[in-house]
Amino acid sequence: MELLIFSDSHGRCEGMQKALSRQLRPPQAVCFLGDGLRDTESLRLERTMLYTVRGNCDWGMQTDVPTERTAVLEGHRLLLTHGHLYGVKGGVGALIAYAAKTASDIVLFGHTHMPYNTVIPAWERVGDVTLSRPMYLFNPGSIGHNEDGKGYSFGTLLLTRDTVLLSHGRV
């Protein structure tokens, strides 16, 4: 399964449209991790699932969209959140602890505008939980802000029962 991951468009949807148009084939799913929910309405997604969560700048709009959600895809439990409720600008410790308690093995978050990708190995102890499989933490960066001068960033996820391949892209 192929997924595109976006966050923090903040009213600038051109980056998402460019990233989508550059894919060799349409992704099976798009994940939007908050702060620009209305921008997802401009995406033309045919036969593509859309998973969205609200960010701290999405308050008051689309209140039916949760601040976090889980999805089970290809046997993996994904946790999607903007990250602000876990203080990710100050570190990912609280988010890791929560993900371990919810048995999530792929954690997608935004909020910091900075790309991030790390893996916690299987059998690592997180609080009172011992991970039975690796935990992947991934932030696509911002698709609406060029924070580091290298272009708008997004993420891709190639997912099978046995494979988790996360990477960053730029437009």
Image: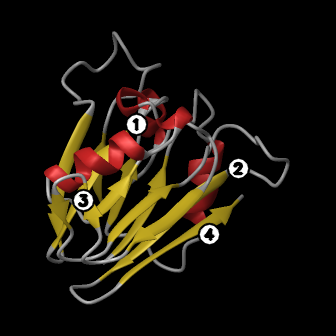
For residue 22, which numbered disc appears in the image?
4
Q: Secondary structure at mark 1?
A: loop
Give the mark toward the camera: 2 or 1: 1
Query: Mark 3 packing: few (<14 Cα in 10 Å), some, or many (20+)?
Result: many
Q: Residue furthest top?
A: 60
Q: Amino acid at mark 3?
A: Leu
* Residue shown at 24% from the left, 59% from the top: 78
N-term-proximal mark, 1 vs 4: 4
N-term-proximal mark, 2 vs 1: 1
Q: Amino acid at mark 2?
A: Tyr
Using the numbered discs, state the Cα–Cα distance from disc 4 to disc 3 in whole angstroms. Answer: 25 Å
Task: Decide if residue 78 is on the left or right side of residue 95.
Answer: left
* Residue shown at 61% from the left, 54% from the top: 115
* Residue shown at 60% from the left, 49% from the top: 141
N-term-proximal mark, 2 vs 3: 3
Give the mark toward the camera: 1 or 4: 1
Image coords of residue 73 (percent x, y): 18, 69
